[in-house]
Amino acid sequence: MEKKTLDILVEVGALLKGHFLLSSGKHSGRYCQCAKLLMYPDKAEQVLEVVADKVKNLEFDLAVGPAMGGIVAAYELARQLKKPAIFTERVEGKMTFRRGFEILPGQRVLIVEDVVTTAKSSMEVAEVIKELGGEVVGIACIVDRSSGSTNYPIYSAVKLEIETYEKEECPLCREGLPCVKPGSRNII
């Protein structure tokens, strides 16, 4: 299944090469732009079927995707599993629920992302869920780049090992390659 997922990511132009500033603040020579996958509902459905199969026996009440990258992925996964889906968004830099979305005490929640690298967004969402009395049962994603950087189980369509660098140690910066920020989180 991972080969099929990789083939689809290549087909839609989601696997990029260059010099990228990640949402975590780290740099990388490769980037997975899942928005290029999610623009094709049929392809997104195929890739998220892989994840749905992995979590179909997991007991959870609700899928929560952090804005921006997790919104469509959470919706599609929840659609396939016949579960509700909501999303968090940042307000003044802090992840929160808006638009009347809520977590009920005791509710079991699956966090859904497009790509998990440092799991920073997922951990921010987990904190909000726990503060409201919910229980995080895991993280589902299209691409897992985390290398085990979370305390929650991760259910992904594909795992990718892509090297990341601190800005000060980035060989791409030393080469003078221009750095682009394709993600949605503001980096200062």
Image: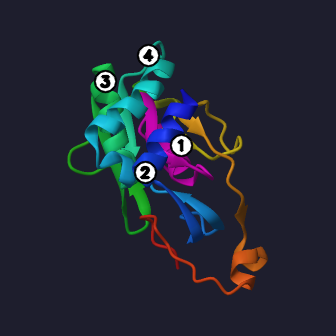
The tag earlier along the polypeptide, 1 or 2, is 2
Helix, strand or loop status at disc 3: helix
Query: Mark 2 — residue?
Result: 34
The span from disc 1 to disc 2 (Cα, nearest Å) is 8 Å
The tag earlier along the polypeptide, 2 or 3, is 2
| Crowd tier of the residue under label 2, counting other residues whose Cα lies within 10 Å: few below 14, some 14–19, many 20 or above | many
Q: Are marks 4 and 2 in contact (CB under 8 Å)?
A: no
Q: Are marks 1 and 2 in contact (CB under 8 Å)?
A: yes
Disc number at residue 143?
1
* 113 is within the stretch colored magenta: yes
Task: Give the label, 1 or 4, closer to the camera.
Answer: 1
Q: Quadrant of the N terminus?
A: top right
Residue placed at 63% from the left, 53% from the top?
Answer: 118
The span from disc 4 to disc 2 (Cα, nearest Å) is 22 Å
Query: Mark 3 — residue?
Result: 80
Helix, strand or loop status at disc 1: strand
| Crowd tier of the residue under label 3, counting other residues whose Cα lies within 10 Å: few below 14, some 14–19, many 20 or above | some
Helix, strand or loop status at disc 4: loop
The tag earlier along the polypeptide, 1 or 4, is 4
Query: Mark 4 — residue?
Result: 56
Q: Which residues are magenta?
A: 109-133
- 146 sits to left or right of 180: right
The tag earlier along the polypeptide, 1 or 3, is 3
Q: Amino acid at mark 1?
A: Val
Q: Amino acid at mark 4?
A: Lys
Q: Amino acid at mark 3?
A: Gln
The tag earlier along the polypeptide, 4 or 2, is 2
